Amino acid sequence: MTKPLVSIVMGSDSDLDIMREASRALEDFGIAYEMDVTSAHRSPERTAEYARKAAARGIRVIIAGAGGAAHLAGVIAAHTSLPVIGVPIPSTSLNGLDSLLATVQMPAGIPVATVAIGKPGATNAGILAAQILAISSAELTKKMAAHKEKLADGVEQKSQKLKTSLGG
């Protein structure tokens, strides 16, 4: 079994449906990952220990998803020098806006790369983690280029389909 390079962590197992999108993106690039649940508020000591020990376990990037007050990514970033990507989870009546603001509004010196709310953000978090890892991996750099090419090809196919359906 390959040692994980990315850790996906969430504040509650109710976030799993969204955070699975990050794992799917990592799987597409062949990147080993782990998943766990820890809470900045309900288990602060566990969260701090998780963050402090991540690098020693071989983790290179942390993806943290949380809803509501969404302090998980920030607390983790305070306890590690690894890159942290925050995924705001739409878990309250504010549809994730509260999570987005809590995740993105970090004080100077404790950065958290923040992506979109929900599943698109989780997908982008996985891709961003792959891009970070690709800095030191020629193999991942090639996979990233192929991913971008696949996106461009998809747009071209949709363009052709639209033109055909419009009779042009």
Image (tube, rainbow, N blue to C red):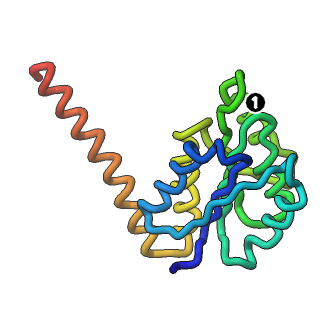
The residue at the far left in this view is: 167
User: Residue 45 vs residue 96: left or right?
Assistant: right
Q: Position of residue 121 (x, y in %)?
A: 57, 42
User: Residue 17 vs residue 68: left or right?
Assistant: left
Q: Is residue 167 above or below residue 115?
A: above
Q: Position of residue 155 (x, y in %)?
A: 30, 39
Which residue is rendered at x = 76% and y = 55% of the image? 38
The residue at the far right in this view is: 45
Q: Is residue 113 visible?
A: no
Which residue is rendered at x = 50% and y = 75% of the image? 137
Amino acid at dot 1 = Asp
Of residues 36 and 3, the one drawn nearer to the viewer in this rendering: 36
Of residues 23 and 60, the one drawn nearer to the viewer in this rendering: 23
Which residue is rendered at x = 66% and y = 48% of the image? 13
Quadrant in the picture for the C terminus? top left
Task: Give the residue pinned by disc 1.
Answer: 98
The residue at the far front in this view is: 13
Of residues 142 and 89, the one drawn nearer to the viewer in this rendering: 89
Of residues 14 and 44, the one drawn nearer to the viewer in this rendering: 14
Q: Is residue 166 above or below residue 130?
A: above
Dot 1 crowding, Cα within 10 Å, few <14, some 14–19, many 20+: some
Which residue is rendered at x = 74% and y = 48% of the image? 11
User: Residue 78 vs residue 21: left or right?
Assistant: right
Quarter of the image for residue 79 reads bottom right
Q: Position of residue 33 (x, y in %)?
A: 57, 66
User: Residue 84 vs residue 156: left or right?
Assistant: right
Q: Position of residue 16 (x, y in %)?
A: 60, 47
- Report the number of numbered marks: 1
Q: Is residue 59 visible?
A: yes
Quarter of the image for residue 14 reads top right
SS of the residue under disc 1:
helix
